[in-house]
Image: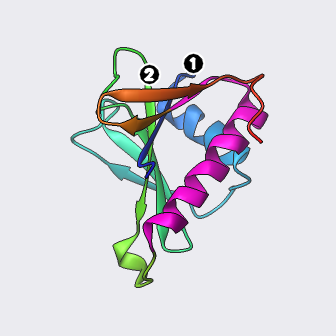
Amino acid sequence: MIEHIFFNMNGEIESVAEIFFSSLGIKANIVEGRSFSSSTGVYYSFSIFGIVIRLEGNCYDYDNEYAYMVGIKEDFLSGLIINDESTLHLANIIIQLLIKNLKIPIAYEIEFGKIKVYMPDEDLS
């Protein structure tokens, strides 16, 4: 299961969030919140299909390599019941959209301590 996606982008979290969500086709209903665990002190999130997509400064692993991380997890506040397969499908869609629209390397953790990096010119089919 993909729970975290990592990437680098120049700029402050506010501008990165605008570009990030725009690359996913999301332009409204983005929630801003405060986070004591985030390296930026703030996060931006959007909930869809019972899954929350949360962008924040990387406070997880690989923080020496990637400035930003995206958490993709069940949105318990939605009241919807989802499974890991749904989260995985949405994570794969997000990865593809980021690579195609931002044209930057995108990484995700395949198992603890091991990441997979997709390059912008890589075939994802």
Magenta span of residues? 83-107
Q: Residue at x 68, y 38 (%)?
A: 98
Q: Residue at x 51, y 29 (%)?
A: 116
Q: What's the distance in space between the residues labelled 1 and 2, CA to CA?
A: 11 Å
Q: Amino acid at mark 2?
A: Tyr
Q: Is residue 28 above or below residue 80?
A: above
Please state if 30 lies on the left or on the right of 38 as rendered.
Answer: right
Q: Main secondary structure of the magenta part?
A: helix
Please give the residue where the numbered disc 2 appears in the rendered image.
66
Q: Residues within 10 Å of mark 1 (few under 14, many from 20)?
A: few
Mark 2 residue element: loop
Q: Residues within 10 Å of mark 2 (few under 14, many from 20)?
A: some
- Pinpoint residue 71: horizontal percent, then vertical percent: 42, 48
Please give the residue where the numbered disc 1 appears in the rendered image.
10
Please state if 87 lies on the left or on the right of 39 as rendered.
Answer: right
Q: Is residue 24 above or below residue 20?
A: below
Q: Residue at x 57, y 33 (%)?
A: 16
Q: Is residue 28 above or below residue 39?
A: below
Q: Residue at x 34, y 14 (%)?
A: 64
Please state if 60 lies on the left or on the right of 90 as rendered.
Answer: left
